[in-house]
Image (cartoon, rainbow, N blue to C red):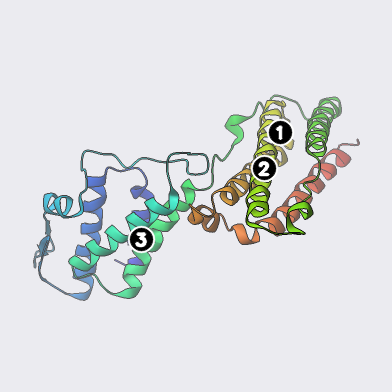
């Protein structure tokens, strides 16, 4: 059995299991690795025997680390949650798992790194926000020219409404705060930036809802979904900016540093695809 298959299967099942099952899964990895490198012997929480079985004291682990085995591992929407902190939860998961692996003699840096990386990937999925699919759209329009023309009109109206809403927000003049920086001006600038970001996010939310409500053609739904999900990603990015001091992992796991550049490129590509779609339909 190759290690790669182990990581693949583990990543597929760990996102939706109870904490008790999760700990058993980690124990199972310890067994596999022990067999692969032919290591046997006792540990604080159990032992690997020659028969390949790993005897794991789950209750002792829970007692030592203060874990409640009755709780289920929940999927948290960190992109929108106001009472959960991704940085804290991720740090705790990595720390506890690392300690558990060390206690069980699994200290090979490559193997340990792969296990911890899988945990990060699971949290990254929960940091992305809702991903819209075809099931969220009404794909009921036909592919004839008249139907596509109506579709184009509806999409154009939604985009125009969005542009007007963004323009109505106006430009934030930060020079009034930065020209003569003081502690008070910095506080005021941060408050103004926060308020502006929240207004943009609200406009984006309306834009998403409006796009979802537009009946789609089968081909157009592809670009419609791309535009919806890109706007969702922008809202997650904006929210990560608001909480970057207290929850930096939300910003990091959403590749915040490069988001603006990617956003400009992606939005241009989607709009171009929409234009070509309508042009090819003879509009």
Label 3: which secondary element: helix
Query: Whole-percent x and y of residue 206?
Result: 69, 30
Query: Whole-percent x and y of residue 233?
Result: 62, 46
Question: In the rendered view, would you say 19 is above or below 114?
Answer: above
Label 1: which secondary element: helix
- The residue located at (20%, 49%) in the rendering is 66
Query: Whole-percent x and y of residue 224?
Result: 71, 37
Q: Which mark is residue 134?
A: none
Question: In the rendered view, would you say 142 is above or below 61?
Answer: above
Q: Are marks 1 and 2 in contact (CB under 8 Å)?
A: yes
Query: Along the horizontal axis of the image, is 63 left or right of 254?
Result: left
Q: Are marks 3 and 2 in contact (CB under 8 Å)?
A: no
The residue where tag 1 is placed is 207
The residue where tag 3 is placed is 7
The residue where tag 2 is placed is 231
Query: Whole-percent x and y of residue 108?
Result: 28, 75
3D distance between C-alphas at marks 3 and 2: 32 Å
Q: Are marks 3 and 1 in contact (CB under 8 Å)?
A: no
Question: In the rendered view, would you say 55 is above or below 1?
Answer: above
Q: Counting residues from the N terminus, which is met first, the one under dot 3 or under dot 1?
A: 3
3D distance between C-alphas at marks 1 and 2: 8 Å
Q: Counting residues from the N terminus, which is met first, the one under dot 1 or under dot 2?
A: 1
- The residue carrying pointer 3 sits among few (fewer than 14), some (14 to 19) or many (20 or more) residues within 10 Å by Cα, namely some
């Amino acid at each position: 059995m190759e290690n790669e298959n182990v990581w693949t299967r583990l990543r597929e099942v760990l996102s939706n299991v109870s904490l008790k099952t999760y700990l058993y899964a980690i124990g199972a990895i310890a067994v596999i690795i022990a067999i692969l490198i032919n290591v046997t012997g006792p540990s604080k929480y159990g032992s690997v025997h020659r028969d390949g079985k790993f005897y794991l004291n789950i209750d002792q682990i829970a007692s030592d680390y203060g874990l409640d085995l009755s709780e289920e591992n929940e999927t948290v929407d960190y992109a929108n949650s106001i009472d959960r902190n991704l940085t804290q939860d991720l740090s705790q998961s990595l720390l506890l798992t690392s300690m558990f692996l060390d206690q069980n003699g699994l200290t090979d840096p490559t193997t340990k790194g792969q296990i911890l990386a899988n945990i990060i990937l699971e949290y990254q999925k929960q940091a992305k926000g809702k991903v819209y699919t075809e099931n969220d759209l009404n794909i009921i329009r036909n592919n004839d020219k008249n139907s596509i023309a109506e579709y184009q009109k509806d999409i154009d109206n939604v985009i125009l409404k969005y542009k007007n809403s963004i323009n109505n927000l106006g430009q934030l003049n930060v020079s009034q705060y930065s020209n003569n920086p003081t502690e008070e001006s910095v506080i005021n600038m941060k408050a103004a930036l926060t308020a502006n970001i929240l207004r943009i996010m609200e406009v984006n939310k309306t834009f998403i809802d409006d796009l979802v409500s537009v009946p789609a053609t089968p081909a157009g739904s592809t670009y419609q979904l791309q535009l919806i999900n890109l706007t969702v990603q922008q809202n997650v990015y904006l929210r990560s900016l608001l909480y970057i001091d207290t929850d930096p992992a939300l910003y990091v796991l959403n590749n915040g540093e490069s988001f603006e550049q990617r956003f400009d490129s992606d939005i241009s590509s989607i709009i171009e695809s929409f234009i070509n779609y309508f042009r090819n339909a003879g509009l």
